[in-house]
Amino acid sequence: MSSCFFSIMYMMKMQGEETLQCFNRRTDSLKFIVFFLWLITAPEGRAGSVSRRLTVQTGGSLIIPCHYDRKYTDHKKYWCFHAKSAYNYCSILAYANETKGRVSVIDHPDQSFFTVTMRNLQNEDTGAYWCVVEIEGIFERDESEQLYLTVQSAPDVSVVNSSVSGQEGGDISVQCFYSSGYKNKLKQWCRYKDQSCYTVGRTNTSQNSSVQISDDGRGSFTVLMTGLRLTDSDWYYCSAGDLQAPVQLNVSENSQVPFLTVNEPKSESVTTEVSERNGDATALSSTTPVSVNTDQTVSSEEQQNENYLYLELWIPAVVLLMVIVIFVSAVKLRKKHNRNEYITEVNRVRASDTVSGNGSSSVLAENDVTYTSVIVQPKTEASSPVSVEDEVTYSSVHKWKPLNT
């Protein structure tokens, strides 16, 4: 009885092993089929997940930075597109350092990134794009980053200026706009290179600069960066939810004298009216804290008032001086004119005397001339104290010296 039982158990074991081997063979066949199907459908697969989502206005332009590892500095880079996000079917729009149609790609190997500029974007340009670094080798995949771009008449997230500039030690302000659907989304200001982000309502101070973000709740938030340094030059982006708007920041050296007295800036409220460029745009009013150095403003106003005071004093003085010069010149000209008339009259009289026979008196040009007139007065009996027989002669002498001509 026992031997029969063991025989049955042995037969069941053998049958189970055969069943298991058959199952394993079928499983291997199934794995092979799945792998084969994956190879066939691989070109339709998507190369990773979307790392960035961007929006741009219809007809507008966009500059997109693509960062890569320094070890790929000498590798080829390109920009490709496929509307349905099929990476293996994407069309290469342009390689680095070339322009094709509306697309330009420029490599910056010293900073380990290349930029893509797309112009006059239309609705059909909506789709998936890839920043790609070409890796040589049959079994090596290219390094790529996927982005998704949406072209809209009114972008959900945008900025006024995609490029801002500032000086070392100074401040910059960037205003970012979002649609009503993103009002309650997280707002951030991030740096592409290291993905360091700053959120609304917080002031983050690092070794580089201080960043403050304020949201007006009506469609825009403002990023204020103070105490800029040269190392802050880089690509950043405004984000609301999963949408981004890239912004390039350039910080230049401060050419002013470094020894300056730094005063505590006072925060003032500045109201800015902004309207979108499309026809359906509405005015957005935002209150943005801006740092204003009141001491420097007062100093400049005092300097300006002092300059005005100088002008008020100098202009009347110059006018008065000009009047005096003109008056003196007129008096001198008048005197010279009268002297010339007098000399002319004297010469005319002398010439008439010469013609009438009195030439002897005019010959002595350098000597004194004496004129004598004699009047004979007949005697009278009533008033004359002398004798009747005498005659009285009266004489007057006038001495005249001619002018030198």
Image: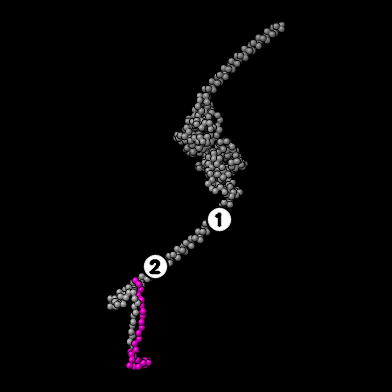
* Callout 2 crowding tier (Cα within 10 Å): few <14, some 14–19, many ≥20: few
Residue 380 lies in the magenta stretch: yes
Instruction: Pick the residue in front: 350 or 105.
Output: 350
* In the image: residue 173, left or right of residue 402: right
Q: Amino acid at mark 1?
A: Glu
* In the image: residue 264, left or right of residue 127: right
Quarter of the rendering occupied by the C terminus: bottom left
Q: Position of residue 297 (x, y in %)?
A: 56, 52
Instruction: Pick the residue in front: 2 or 237.
Output: 237
Q: Is residue 245 visible?
A: no
Q: Is residue 205 visible?
A: yes
Quarter of the rendering occupied by the N terminus: top right
Q: Residue at x 34, y 79 (%)?
A: 370
Q: Which mark is residue 368?
A: none
Q: Which mark is residue 302?
A: 1
Instruction: Pick the residue in front: 373 or 248.
Output: 373
Which residue corresponds to mark 2?
333
The answer for how far apart the CA atoms under marks 1 and 2 are is 47 Å
Q: Is residue 28 above or below residue 168?
A: above
Q: Which residues are magenta?
A: 378-405
Q: Amino acid at mark 2?
A: Leu
Magenta highlight: main SS: loop
* Callout 1 crowding tier (Cα within 10 Å): few <14, some 14–19, many ≥20: few
For label 2, the SS is helix
Q: Residue at x 66, y 11 (%)?
A: 13
Q: Residue at x 64, y 11 (%)?
A: 15
Residue 341 lies in the magenta stretch: no
Q: Residue at x 28, y 76 (%)?
A: 355
Instruction: Pick the residue in front: 139 or 4.
Output: 139
- Dividing the picture into quadrants, the one containing residue 211 is top right
Sequence-wise, the earlier of marks 1 and 2 is 1
